[in-house]
Amino acid sequence: MIDLLTIFVLAAFVGFEVVSKVSTILHTPLMSGANAIHGVILVGAILITGAAESGVQVVLGLLAVFLATVNVVGGFVVTDRMLEMFKGHKR
């Protein structure tokens, strides 16, 4: 258990350091790539929830599906807003 917690903390730290070093020009393509990864995570959460055998597993699976869906939709909304900034003004 402590091994998994250590890996999680290290991954969070490395992820924060990597993302904080990304330039603003690369942020939109990075968000698009992250949205694709989150889509895969959503599919995985759905598959895991479908194979759940106990009530706790189903509840945790549904929570994972909900959070992954919010993450995907929010990522696309943010990406769309960022792309709108680069479009010209309509007359």
Image (tube, rainbow, N blue to C red):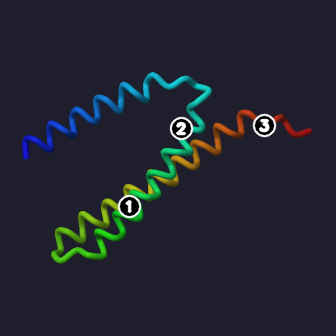
Q: Is 82 above or below relative to 25?
A: below
Name, please, the residue furthest toward the right: 91
Q: Is 51 above or below relative to 75?
A: below
* Spot occupied by residue 73 in the image (x, y as percentages of width and height): 52, 54
Q: Quadrant of the C terminus?
A: top right
| Tally of numbered discs | 3
Mark 3 or mark 1: which comes first in sequence? Answer: 1
Residue at 58% across / 25% down in the picture? 24
Quadrant in which residue 83 is drawn:
top right
Q: How dense is the environment of label 3, judged by Cα within 10 Å: few (below 14), some, or many (20 and up)?
A: few
* Spot occupied by residue 10 in the image (x, y as percentages of width and height): 23, 32
Q: Mark 2 points at which residue?
A: 30
Kindly indicate whether the residue at mark 3 contacts the one at mark 2 (C-beta within 8 angstroms): no
Residue 26 as seen in the image, left or right of residue 4: right
Q: Distance between the residues labelled 1 and 2?
A: 23 Å
Q: Residue 66 got which mark?
A: 1
Amino acid type at image mark 3? Lys
Mark 1 or mark 2: which comes first in sequence? Answer: 2
